[in-house]
Image (tube, rainbow, N blue to C red):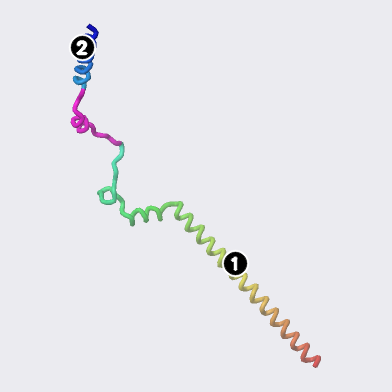
Amino acid sequence: MKNVIFASAVLALSTVACSKREPVADNVQEIKLKYDTTAIDSFSPGATSVDIARQIRMSSQKYQDSLKEALKLQQEEKRITEELEKENKKKAEAEKKLKASENTAESKQE
């Protein structure tokens, strides 16, 4: 009696389990993912070329500000080097005058 009940339970479970199965291939074909954005690669009609992207970056305010800052730094460096050159010239002239005065003082002592 126990064997009959056990066999009928196994048979019932196997029929229920088999009846709920669906083919996997049909399920995969039905699934289509929907995205809210579209991918644009470099060859698609809506893509921007490298040159246009470069022009866009160059026209941005941040880029323009960085150019102005770089120009200011170059001008400041140029001003500093000019001042250093002037100071070096003055020191060289002062040394020449000092040597010249020492040479004249030595020649008078002889």
Q: Nearer the viewer, mark 1 or mark 2?
A: 2
Q: In the rendered view, would you say 101 is above or below 14?
A: below
Q: Is residue 21 left or right of residue 108?
A: left
Q: Which residue is found at the position 22% from the left and 32% from the top?
A: 28
Q: Which residue is mark 1?
A: 80
Identify which residue is drawn at 60% across, 67% down: 80
Identify the magenta region.
Answer: 21-35
Mark 2 secondary-structure assignment: helix
Res 103 quadrant in image:
bottom right
> Quadrant where the N terminus lies?
top left
In terms of secondary structure, where does tag 1 sit?
helix
Taking the image as shown, residue 75 lies to the left or right of residue 108, namely: left
Q: Earlier in the sequence, mark 1 or mark 2?
A: 2
Residue for badge 2:
8
Q: Which quarter of the figure is the C terminus placed in?
A: bottom right
- Of all residues, the one furthest to the bottom in this rendering is 110
Q: Is residue 32 magenta?
A: yes
**31 part of magenta stretch:** yes
Q: Position of residue 49 (x, y in %)?
A: 31, 54
Farthest top residue?
1
Identify the residue shown where x is 30% and y is 36%.
36
Nearest to the observer: residue 72 or residue 25: 25
Q: Position of residue 40 (x, y in %)?
A: 29, 46
Q: Position of residue 4 (x, y in %)?
A: 20, 9
Is residue 29 positioned above or below 15 on the image? Answer: below
Above or below: residue 11 compared with residue 70: above
> Residue 57 bears which disc, if any?
none
x, y percent for residue 25: 19, 32
Identify which residue is drawn at 29% across, 36% down: 35
Q: On the picture, is 6 further left or further right than 60?
A: left
- Spatial distance from mark 1 to mark 2, Cα to Cα? 101 Å
Residue 109 as seen in the image, left or right of residue 59: right
